Amino acid sequence: MQRIICLAAAIIALPSTASAQAQGATSDDDIEVRGRRDAITTLTRSTLPIVDVPQSITVIPAETYLLQGAISVADTVRYVAGAQGAASRDTRFDPVKIRGVDPSLLRDGMHDHYAFFVNITPDPYAFSQVELLRGPASMLFGRGSIGGVVNLTSKSPQLQDRGEVQWISGSFGRGELLADVETVTGATLGTRLVVRARGAGSYAPHVPDDRLLVAPSLAWRPAAGTDIALLASYQHDRTGSISNFLPVIGTMRDNHGRAPLPRFLFLGVPGDDRYDGTARQIGAIASQRLGDAGRLALRARYTSGEVEYRTHYPDSYARPTDPYLPDGTWRRIPLDAYGSHGGIQVLAGDANLGWRLATGPVTHQLLAGADYGWHAAYRRFGLSRQVIDLYAVDRAAIRPAPRRRPQRYAESDRQLGAYAQDELRLWDRASLVVGVRHDRVSTEGAAARHDGPVTTAPGTRVDRATTLRVGASADLGGGVTPYLSYNESFEPLPGVTATGTPFVPKTGHQHEAGIKWQPDAATLVTLAAFRIAEDHRLVPDPHVPDEQVQAGTMLIHGGEIEARRTLPGDYELSVAYAVNHFTGRDATFDAAARHLASLWLTKTIAAGPGTWRLGGGVHYIGEQVSRNASWTLVTPANTLVDALSDYRIDRWRIAVNATNLFDRRSYANCLARGDCFAAAPRNVMVSLGVAL
């Protein structure tokens, strides 16, 4: 709390110079158009507006997802078609799925997440928007998931004087200060500082949710057509694991007539269990216009971080259908303690040259570039085990997670990719996009199970892949634009089979067809149908227990509709629905819902000298099927309600957000491997803010 108070005093003093320099700022309209254009270029390497891009895309501005009460990146996509943010929360990473699959996470168009338990979750307040590209995107960004891409666009100076400071108080002892302050010098140099300082508990007992984020940035425009931005961030989290991994038997499934276990039962050692991490980043983004036809763009980022992780969890995995010891009581269960310390370093860079060329009725937007990525991660860990009575926990007898960590997991890889794309615009009515990319990935490292031995892959493995992107769209008039596209992906896998054979990359492709309708600037409707196939998935080795082979094939086909509209009478509406069908050999889709739907609606009302914005939303996560050789589990559907009340007068704002408004007590998902996760309870936040 002392840290928050000191930061508050420092930040409130910053804008004293900002209000005196407003004359040099760029107009609001110019900034808005520039931001939208950069977002599309970053996400698709395209100059086309979203309605003409032959692929399904959604951009969520920060104002929208913060009004919806988002406190994690997973929360930002709750009202997006085809995206599933978990009904529970995980403080260690963001559980997001797109089209039933974990997506790739990018920051400013560069990969941002590599290994589990050595990363901390990004803070949504640090970004100006979150962008989703559905389906494979390896031609654009190299290695990646078949599900799609989530790209986080960092806040950067817009050469204006503005700022805001907010104080938030909420459920579970939440208290935090947020500040976002920009200043401009002349018309060429701007600075920005984003801060979040939080002291909070969580809905899991003995698990804090503290965070300090400091993200300064600088923008320089020394001449017309030249843009340079330097971005840095420091984030320190002090938290733990909210996920308590309780057995299915005793939670969603009955345990011989006993009452269900408490949904958020804590099984660790208070004050010792933790997930504490620090991340530091520094980067640069630059572009130079070359005459009227060309543009050179460069971006780079370096990241370093470390995480201390100590936790306890019951072992229901060896016998998921009957996890308790066979002593006739159905109460006693092994409790595993896991302790690790890990670190990561990442270097990423991208350079490309774009050139516009007209040949008769056809305009070509040519793009050629290369990107490079290197990352190295390690984790030292140790395991211990004891037996506890899960229905009468003797907390004093639980031993802390081991400090001795004899096992070591380490991996590193380098990726070098070269890509080229031609974006053809015919008679300013139709578009054809053709792209090709070649990647070389060299990997050194190991594959380690969370609770098992490390298997080292011999030497350095080199994987190569060539991926394609082809798409076409046509404006039929009235804002109606149908499109077709084909995209490919590849995803290298660390580790080896039981015989020592290195895993080959997973490969996938998608066919997509859709229609976009944008009759005016206030409306965008997207209807899409798709089919995704992926080969070389890991499946259990039928001959060697606890080992894997590559024999899996996954097929996903489905459809989505998303509509965003500003209605007469100051209403804003967002509607989304998606259906996914999963088939294929050993098609395991844990926590992937077949049906997803959402609706978000707000109404702005004049109220004396100020304005009210009232609204709320409903998001539905359908049944989730999880199966293995032992059984098939179905997690019932969830329907959760959120609400918003926002009042603004002059420079002041007071808002109340509530997620899971009716405190629905349900399970977010239960997995056939043996554990269940409760949905997050109601969370209420009250914020008081002032514009500077």
Image: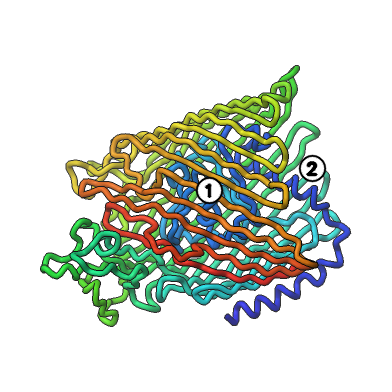
Mark 2: secondary structure = loop
Secondary structure, mark 1, is: strand
The outermost residue toward the left is 327
At 41% across and 48% down in the image, what residue appears?
A: 622
Q: Amino acid at mark 2?
A: Gly
The answer to whether 527 appears left or right of 510 in the picture is right
Q: Nearer the viewer, residue 262 or 318?
A: 262
Residue farthest to the top?
360
- Say whether residue 129 is visible: yes
- Measured in 3D between alpha carbons, the distance from the residue under mark 2 to the one under mark 1, in whole angstroms, is 27 Å
The numbered mark, 2 or 1, whose residue comes first in the sequence reads 1
- Return the residue nearer the eye: 229 or 415: 229
Tell me the quadrant of the picture where the C terminus can be found: bottom right
* Residue named by callout 2: 225
Percent x, y of residue 205: 40, 75
Residue under the point 66% across and 50% down: 572
Identify the residue shown where x is 20% and y is 56%.
321
Whether residue 495 is situated above or below residue 170 in the rendered picture: above
Residue 354 lies left or right of residue 560; in this view the side is right
Q: Which amino acid type corresponds to the residue marked 1 in the rendered image?
A: His
Q: Position of residue 626 (x, y in %)?
A: 31, 48
- State the residue position of label 1: 111
Q: Is residue 671 above or below residue 415?
A: below
570 or 130, which is in the foreground? Answer: 570
Give the quarter of the image for residue 216.
bottom right
Q: Are marks 2 and 1 in contact (CB under 8 Å)?
A: no
